[in-house]
Image (cartoon, grey):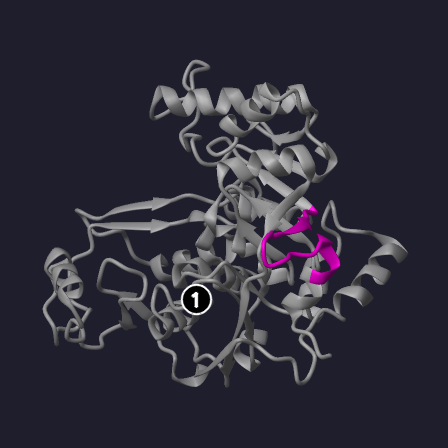
Amino acid sequence: MPETLFDKVWNRHVVTPETPDTPGVLYVDLHLVHEVTSPQAFSEIEARGLSVRRPDRTFATLDHSTPTLPAVDGVRPYVTPEARSQVERLEANCARHGIRLAGWGSEDRGVVHVMGPELGLTRPGMTVVCGDSHTATHGAFGALAFGIGTSEVGHVLATQCLLQRKPKTMRVTVTGRLQPGVSGKDMALAIIARLGFGGGTGHVIEYAGEAVRALDMEGRMTLCNMSIEAGARAGMIAPDPVTVAWLQGRRHAPSGEAFGRAAADWLTLRSDPGAVFDSEIEIDGNAIRPMATWGTTPDAGSPVGAPVPEPRDATGARALTYMGFTAGEATTGHRVDVVFVGSCTNGRLPDLRAAAEVLRGRKVSPGVRMLVVPGSEAVRRDAEAEGL
């Protein structure tokens, strides 16, 4: 029977199949950990006398509660005492359980969904979990990656497995080619505007089509990252030569002959002709334009300069009032107060290059605050080396 990309990865990792009464048991290849959702999980397994089952398949980083500004006189400017406590507890937990940690002073430290791919920890065909909703980012490599809650973080630490019901599947095919100046972020916002912010609920989305294939890996990561804004459990893109080239030479990727064997396997991870999805939609990539959101939900998006549509309900009307828009008004012409470049969605080097290109020969307008937060120490080093 023809299988989808999702089916192939899922079936490789089923330890115990689900039944009408019980979820299945799914093996986890990579568990990414950070300081916010892990303290209670470590406390729980220790209270039960358990240890970390596979520290070699667990990797931690400091990324949510860490100040961007450097230490002054050896004191780091944490925003709250709770943030300091979270960091200190992760440091202690990793030391106690033998877990690799990209901590202060590590050249690897960064946003978990930027750092993981950079290091080659994320690879096609893997199952990846993290206590963070945007774990879907890693699906850009043909991995099945999704966020989990704190209790599930503890379960994976103790067992390297997870209880899961098999989700539904959706294929979003983006045909044609994106126009110059249109990015993977615009594609994501156009898809979310089409689906609605709950349109992907209960599904794993596979992104396919010529326009998706034309994205670089950074654009693919942005697209899969934002699957969550459509309500989806995860997003995936089948591996191809672009994926293989991006991973070659990464520290934790296979090397030598092992890389060749791995790459040959990765390239088999694609949906078979005739594979059946629970739902499918198609979008014309040629028609996607630079997007802006005008409301308070990610599906409230329109091409830049297009008129804001009439609200569909009272919630939409309240959103327009809150944002200071009126129906029929163009999204251009409004004053910008803050510009932020960064995050797990757009904190990679190509994102910083794009922002720098916009600013080239210009200055930030008085009264506008601009914040740039590289997604990792590696991105920061490269950006500084390029003079961005």
What residue did someone put label 1 on? 200
Q: Name the element at disc 1.
A: loop
89 left or right of 268 in image: left
- Furthest residue in direction top, as rendered: 73
Magenta highlight range: 11-29
Horizontal and vertical percent position of residue 109: 57, 36
Residue 143 sits in which quadrant?
bottom right
Asked whether 222 falls inside the magenta stretch, the response is no
In the image, 73 versus 26, the foreground residue is 26
Q: Residue at the spot x=32%, y=70% of the render?
A: 291
Residue 87: image location, x then y, percent: 49, 24
- The residue located at (63%, 38%) in the rendering is 156
- Does the magenta segment cover residue 13? yes
Name the image quarter holding residue 10: bottom right
Q: Nearer the viewer, residue 70 or 326?
A: 326
Task: Specify whether residue 72 is in view.
Answer: yes
Q: Is residue 45 above or below residue 245?
A: above
Q: Amino acid type of disc 1?
A: Gly
Give the crowd class for mark 1: few <14, some 14-19, many >=20 residues within 10 Å.
many
| Viewer-proximal residue among 341 and 356 | 341
